[in-house]
Amino acid sequence: MKRVIVVLLCLGSFIGVAQSKSTIKKNKIKSSTSESTKVEDGKTVVKKEVEVYDDQGNVTEEATYINNKLEKKETKKFNKNGEVTEHVVYNIDGSIKKKVITKYNASNDKTEELTYDGAGTLIKKEVFAYNSFGEKTTETTYNGAGKLIEKAVYTYDSKGLKKERLTYDVDNRLIGKKVFTYTFK
């Protein structure tokens, strides 16, 4: 019987208890917690996962605890359209490990992503550009000092389907190519 309970508890940790965003919003759920227990190498391991939600049902905080010790924590802020504008990853001591700030244009396309280290120093900047059809045309990456690292250029066919992504290094040398193909019904 003990084995059956342990197996069921382990399966529960993989199935999860997540609810849909609309269910969270409709029921005005503020947070949810799931707890699973399993035995590893003869020791009981208790994993607790906590999610906190905003009024729109977005997950604003996720934390994982193993035997009541923080294992992982992340927070997110959202704009009125539900896009992530700030994503913070924490160290297990609770200090900030990394912060990513994302900006969007009036069409809700991501235009800029700024990545900071735990001390608040900019370590990477990505800039995204779009054509008049709303298709991403370039993705340019800079280091924290503003020096170009690489640039990706996207091309599309007459149907607006992505054809390829060409990546260039700081000296404008092709360093990567990704080709997209499609099959139709």
Image (cartoon, grey):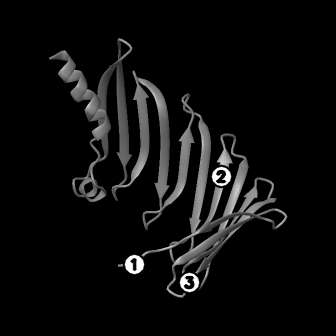
As measured in the structure, the alpha-carbon distance from the residue carrying label 3 to the one carrying label 1 is 15 Å
The spot of residue 66 in percent (x, y) is 41, 25
Q: Which residue bears the numbered disc 1?
A: 184
User: Above or below — where is 176 with respect to 135?
Assistant: above
Residue type highlighted by circle 1: Phe
The spot of residue 19 in percent (x, y) is 27, 50
Whether residue 106 is visible here, answered yes or no, is no
The spot of residue 171 in percent (x, y) is 85, 64
Mark nearest the camera among 3 and 1 is: 1
Residue type highlighted by circle 2: Thr
Q: Are marks 3 and 2 in contact (CB under 8 Å)?
A: no
User: What residue is rendered at 27% in x and 59% in y?
Assistant: 22
As measured in the structure, the alpha-carbon distance from the residue carrying label 3 to the one carrying label 2 is 32 Å
User: What residue is rendered at 27% in x and 48% in y?
Assistant: 29
Q: Quadrant of residue 152?
A: bottom right
Residue 56 or residue 167, whichever sits in front? 167
Of marks 3 and 2, which one's residue comes earlier in the chain?
A: 2
User: What residue is rendered at 51% in x and 77% in y?
Assistant: 107
Q: Residue furthest bottom?
A: 158
Q: Which residue bears the numbered disc 3?
A: 157
Q: Which residue bears the numbered disc 2?
A: 115
Residue type highlighted by circle 3: Asp
